[in-house]
Image (spheres, rainbow, N blue to C red):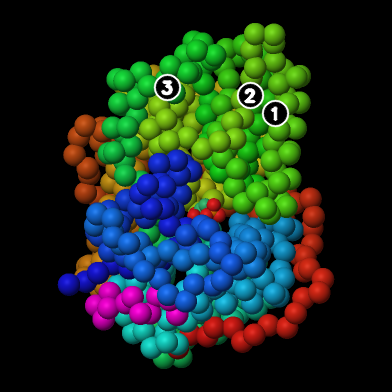
Amino acid sequence: MMRLVVVSNRVTMPERGEKVAAGGLAVALRSALEQHGGLWFGWSGATSAEPATRVEPIRLGKVSYAVVDLTEAERQSYYLGFSNRALWPLMHYRLGLTEFDRSDYAGYLAVNRRFAKLLVPLLKPDDVIWIHDYHLIPLAAELRRRGVTNRIGYFHHIPWPSAEVFGALPFSATLISTMMAYDLVGMQTQTDADNLIGGLVALRGAHRDGERVKAGPRQTLVRAFPIGIDVESFRKLAAASVRAATQPIRATTGPLGGRKLVIGVDRLDYSKGIVQRLEAFGQFLRSHPEHRGNVGLLQIAPPSRSDVPEYAELDRQSDEVAGRLNAALGEFDWTPIRVVKKAYSRSALAGFYRRAQVGLVTPMRDGMNLVAKEYVAAQNPEDPGVLVLSRFAGAAHQMGEALIVNPYDTHEVAEAIRTALAMPQSERVRRFERLYATIAASDIGWWTSRYLAALTGTGASDSLAPPEPQRTVSGTRKPAARQRATTSPAAKKPAAKTAAKPVQAADDASLGEKRGSFRQRAGSKPLPNAASPR
Ligand code: F6P
């Protein structure tokens, strides 16, 4: 019988998993693996002095976990360096923040080689291997090099930029070529899929045949699979938080009193647009002083990758901006902005979302953004809040009934907050029902089964198509086009899906950068041979 082997940089074991950050890969994979059972392999999150030479899986329920420590040097080069100072900003269209260092790249390739070496002895002939995210792009090529012939899929959780942007990365042609070692590559949106295919054609000289890419003897299927959440269990968590009057609900009726609540929940990451969001909230209060004293912004921002200088700078900057706005706009009995830099349990978050009249999800660029889906899933169907969503989040391709905004435009976001707070109940319910229908029809179970059907070749290809995007008007004043038949949370999931999509974003790689150039660190060393596909 087929066994699922999931590989990701981050692995959350059950006893460690309660306070995982909102949304995100770890939560989604945990749901997927709990449904299917199998093996989850990846970094333990810890470091040890010596590199591990073997790994012993631990079985907990339906899932076995095989986790490996990194050495501190590996954490620096593979995780903090190449993954998060080169690939992360590059993939989020932030060339000005991209730091390329040859020894980091060498470390990245070496960890992928070591992971391949440790994983091979754990594999069985019928295993289907599903590798996740940018930390592990060359892993399939390394497995193929060791003779692995199993089906291997990859899912990319973050955006994939155009060949023009990706091609700026030194060794981009070598790295993108390793994608050809996969049988299936999943992307969050069709834009990302087209960008990857365009990159393989431009940088690798591959040939495109629809959603298939051919290079040498290999053929790879590249398709969009927008990731979802476990909508039903998140809805139940939120409803329970009201019934039990749990901590978050009590807390927000305390210091926040009967005031309205606008909420943002993100890892403290520059891609999430937290500073720009605080400024937009300040702009909203300046433009609409009648709201002062009546509404507050709660920004939950658990720190992330704090050893990376750009993240430490964001930490400082968000404190500075929140402090300045609170001093300028606050009153003796009212603080407009609260930034809380800690992680909350999922049930606490569900309670906060349910209590908030506005969910402010305004990343500058995001693969999908599962907080947008969690916010909708948590709403009271009879009196729901309003989602304000960045057009640069993958979720905007599906969630056209949100108020779609350009996060670079502070005034537009400020107006969207005003529109959301003033929206009549009937309009809120109408938008909510359509958004809920969309996220329920493309939930985590849908995502997992569609992906695995495509990877194992067991699905009819037309039933695997992602929700078809339609073009609609972007902006806060014109509601997006109707997506599909309305389905309330209590009703059955609809079978057919279509989705709304905002006007396609221009390539904004150069926007919002303080530093315009692509930086390479001094003292770069020559590279070892990069992995190549077979
Ligand atoms: O979804 C993108 C992602 O980088 C995941 O790969 C990762 O698990 C998550 O964000 C959180 O980042 P980190 O593991 O670096 O804390």
Residue extent of the magenta highlight? 116-127
Residue at far top of view = 333
Q: Label 3 amino acid? A: Gln
Q: Nearer the viewer, residue 374 or 281?
A: 374
Question: x and y percent of residue 343 in the render?
Answer: 51, 37
Disc on the earlier residue, 1 or 2: 1
Ligand 1 lies under 8 Å from the Cβ of mark 3: no
The residue beneath circle 1 is 322
Real-space CA distance between mark 2 and mark 3, rounded to the nearest whole angstrom: 20 Å
Q: Nearer the viewer, residue 231 or 140?
A: 140
Q: Do residues under tags 1 and 2 come within 8 Å of each other at their CB atoms?
A: yes
Disc on the earlier residue, 3 or 1: 3
Q: Can you say which quadrant of the picture contains the C terminus?
A: bottom left
Real-space CA distance between mark 1 and mark 2, rounded to the nearest whole angstrom: 6 Å
Residue in view at x 59 percent, y 72 percent:
108
Residue 296 numbered tag: none
The residue beneath circle 3 is 247
Q: In the image, 45: left or right of 183?
A: right
Q: Label 2 amino acid? A: Ile
Near mark 3 (Cα within 10 A), the count class, few <14, some 14-19 or many ≥20, is: some
Quarter of image, res 283? top right
